[in-house]
Image (tube, helix red, strand yellow):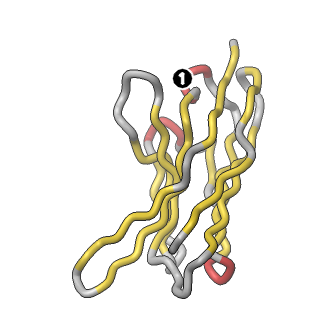
Amino acid sequence: QVQLVESGGGLVQAGGSLRLSCAASGSGFRFNAMGWYRQAPGKQRELVAAIASGGSTNYADSVKGRFSIPADNAKNTVALQMNSLKVEDTAVYYCNAVVFSLGQRYDYWGRGTQVTVSS
């Protein structure tokens, strides 16, 4: 049973920074990718940033240049460093881990952590 546990959310003023962390437990394998999604009220969940096991990264256009996604594949941990936060970054942020096995994609999710950016 894989569990992803997020930490680091909270309230911050616009222009500030936050760092989210995610640790996976109960896993006997390494993930093919880990990342962060977010969901704002009334909106669909969207990809924020992801990093593959080989180190390649993918960022949403809205966060490029402001967010980074350091990861430690050996420890199955991933973080999201968020700088220059904007009010529109307010959302619940979810940690995600992906495993590809026998042609199937398996997604694992954390419970989410709230990030609120005030003006």
- Quadrant of res 104: bottom left
Classify residue 47 as left or right of residue 104: right
Residue at 45 percent across and 63 percent down: it is 108
Classify residue 103 as left or right of residue 43: left
Image coords of residue 56 (percent x, y): 49, 70
- Quadrant of res 41: top left
State whether residue 22 is above or below residue 88: below
Residue at 63 percent across and 34 percent down: it is 114
State whether residue 12 is above or below residue 1: above
Image quarter of the C terminus: top right
- Label 1 amino acid? Glu
Query: Extreme top residue here?
Result: 119
Image coords of residue 77 (percent x, y): 66, 69
Closer to the camera in the image, 32 or 2: 2
Count of numbered marks = 1
Residue at 51 percent across and 59 percent down: it is 35
Closer to the camera in the image, 97 or 4: 4
Query: Extreme left residue here?
Result: 103
Residue denoted by label 1: 88
Crowding at dot 1, Cα within 10 Å, few <14 / some 14-19 / many 20+, comes out as few
- Quadrant of res 8: top right
Image coords of residue 43 (percent x, y): 37, 27
Image coords of residue 1 (percent x, y): 51, 74
Classify residue 104 as left or right of residue 4: left
State whether residue 96 is above or below residue 94: below
State whether residue 73 is above or below residue 37: below
Closer to the camera in the image, 31 or 65: 31
User: Is label 1 in a helix, a strand or a loop?
Assistant: helix
Residue at 45 percent across and 57 percent down: it is 58
